[in-house]
Amino acid sequence: MATPINLKELSKQEVRFTAGHRLCAGCAAPIVVKMVLLAACDYPVVVASSTGCLEVSSCISTYTAWKVPWIHNAFENAAATLSGVESMYRALKKRGKIDKDIKFIAICGDGGSYDIGFQSLSGAMERGHDMLYVCYDNGAYMNTGIQRSGATPTFADTTTCPAGVVIPGKPQQRKDLTRIMAAHGLPYVAQASPSHWPDLMKKVRKAIEISGPKFINIFTPCNRGWRSRTDDAIMLSRLAVETCFWPLYEVEEGITRITVKPRDKRPIVEFLKAQGRFKHLFEPGKEKMIEQLQEMIDKNWERLLKEEEMTSPKDEGNE
Amino acid sequence: MTKIVAVTGNEAVANAFRQIEPDVCAAYPITPQTELMQRFAAFVSNGQVRTEMILVESEHSALSACVGAAAAGGRVATATSSQGLALMWEILFIASGLRLPIVMPVVNRALSAPINIHCDHSDAMGARDSGWIQLWSENAQEAYDNTIQAFRIAEDMNIRLPVMVCYDGFIISHSIERIEYLEDEIVKNFVGEYKPLYPLLDVENPKSYGPLILTDLYHEVRKAHSEVYKRVPKVVLEVAKEFEKISGRKYELFENYRLDDAEIGIVILNSAAGTTKDVIDEYRERGVKVGLLKPRLYRPFPYEEVANALKNLKAVCVLDRADAFGGSFGPLYLDIAASLCNFSQKPILINRIYGLGGRDFMPEHAAEVIEELKDIAQTGKIIKLKEYIGVRE
Ligand SMILES: Cc1ncc(C[n+]2csc(CCOP(=O)(O)OP(=O)(O)O)c2C)c(N)n1
Ligand code: SF4
Ligand SMILES: [Mg+2]
């Protein structure tokens, strides 16, 4: 029987990502990793990671924080690498050399997923490998020092697109990787946040039980890059959900369902003001920029609500 | 019982793959390799092998998937040419650094720009320092034989390194030749069961692959890695000996063709060696003491053995089917020169670049070089150290 997703039962499970890793204090990445692995606690798993903060901090010289088999190949190829592992699993199963039920999970940064690893991710998903790809999205290339990525929010200050007098942080919109993955026609795609851990873990659990390629994008605060307090990771994750900056939803077989609908949608300014990367938006004369951001978020949220309504299965027999 | 057939080089190597039946193969099309994996894919589709094919979206992913599959714990192969190999470059070093026994035929083709689909050796030469073992093959028979031996060499417990099997694009990959196939059972027994080492799929004994190692230990790790290559020639020779028993065909680290009493010599890789040997035979009939050295194990390069074979000659021309731009010599020349540089007795060396982008290497080109070597042996004078031959004026 599957382990129920409640604190009492989960607290009895082995934590398969140990303490002693060298991620920053207050980093949300290890929290996300532990939640993902705990949700998958009923299975042996093999994990692949792309180069990035999580990877460089979790396996150094002869030390490893991974209590599961883990592979890091390069920055842009975790999906291809894991597709190789999964193919070998099927090959050896076919030959009767392995009989266990093993699950395959990639855990990669936004740079390794939205940008340089995009092709590898898209290819592996299109080929239909039985794997769950988790992107821990901290909105920049953090490992190399907070450079802009395709996931960086509009107007955020990064080291390659710093908020200057002429260019006010990142001018472009974020790439919506979750929707792009949904457009691959995958059996399961979702967005999650560590603030809503039962939702996150249920999504991982659901994905693990579905065979084929799955994608979950997880909001992952980085205090170092966001210029926020070290104890704000969960607060910021919650604000991202409640402002609808990071809606929690899933797309299962083409049906979109918003899994957590904020009772009172909070203004984006609350999310922005807790982060130094948006500090420049609070200078006099920049009010328009915050309004602009609010409009973008409202538009996306409206679109998502419509998508949910459009795709929801109608009870056709009922006139 | 061997079976004699008339097939292309690609077909022969695809047949070797069928006989070996790797657990996982990744494939991406590129001329002139494409036909090899197409033929193999047909074996998969028709149920003649149980191999899992990964039809990736790029060569970068092909090799990345091979790294994952090999680390998972089974037999793995892929193949490529030219731009495909160039795109894999980053992962070549990771495959060797992680000591993963992947076998990859490289069907040699020129590099862009300008784009050209025909043979030269720029692709594999660009990867010669990537830590892969390289076996070079004169003809389809050698490509077939080297492919079979490559799995044994790669998977040897004292080595565990990836291997490239190089053969000339179109000239060998697409020309039909007479080949002796070994029986399926004989090949299967020769290659044997795959022995996994620290497989990722052993979930009870979790291993981490691909750590970060900084200034404290990286230097030591690389030094230890370099030691592995010293063990390669011995294993290559042992595997060749066993292969001779099942095939009757003898393989060494390089082919020594009429070198023992030679005064002048040619060093050349792959298919052009065949043409050159014919011309050497003609000169020998006329009493000219000329011989040829054809490297087979090009990486790791058997410096000592090669130097011993060449040091007593008077003049040697190294023919490179790739240039190293920027005023330097062709890559093969550099290795031969490095092998000989510390001997007090050594031949005069010249370097000729031939056959780029599929330009034919004709018997008259070999003759031209031999004539020049005769002069150099007589006069001790070099007119040109490095030059292109076969250039249209
Ligand atoms: C091919 C290649 N280009 C660049 C790098 C340098 N690099 C290493 S990690 C990294 C950023 C990782 O960003 P992300 O995937 O978002 O993970 P994060 O560090 O933010 O967790 C970069 C640019 C690299 N290792 N390989
Ligand atoms: S820089 Fe950010 S993502 Fe990287 S370890 Fe520190 S807090 Fe985590
Ligand atoms: Mg990032």
Image (tube, rainbow, N blue to C red):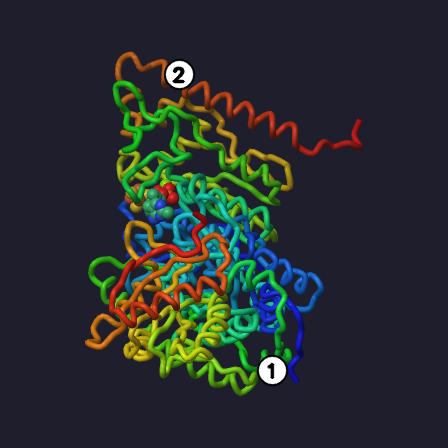
Which quarter of the rendered image does ligand 1 occupy? top left
What residue is drawn where x is 70% and y is 66%?
B47
**Position in image of residue B176 (x %, y %):** 63, 66
Q: Is residue A217 left or right of residue B43?
A: left
Same chain for labels 1 and 2? Say yes or no: no
Q: Is residue B386 left or right of residue A134?
A: left
**Position in image of residue A224 (x %, y %):** 27, 39
Do callouts 1 and 2 mark residues in contact (Cβ within 8 Å)? no
What residue is drawn where x is 44% and y is 44%?
B113
What residue is drawn where x is 54% and y is 40%?
A181
**Residue bearing mark 2:** A291
Mark 2 lies on a secondary structure that is helix
Question: Does residue A42 appear anywhere in the picture?
Answer: no
Tell which tag, 1 or 2, sits nearer the viewer.
Answer: 1
- Quarter of the figure that contains the C terminus of chain A: top right
Bin the neighbour count of mark 1 within 10 Å (Cα to Cα): few under 14, some 14-19, many 20 and up. Answer: some
**Position in image of residue A40 (x %, y %):** 50, 55
Return the mark for residue B137: none
Instruction: For mark 2, name the chain.
Output: A
Residue B308 vertical position relative to residue A135 in the rendered view, above or below: below
**Pick the front one: A181 or B70:** B70
State how many labels appear: 2
**Position in image of residue B380 (x %, y %):** 25, 69
Which of the 4 image quadrants contains residue A143?
top left
Which amino acid, by three-letter code, is at mark 2?
Answer: Glu
**Residue bearing mark 1:** B186
- Quarter of the figure that contains the N terminus of chain A: bottom right
**Pick the front one: B263 or A35:** B263
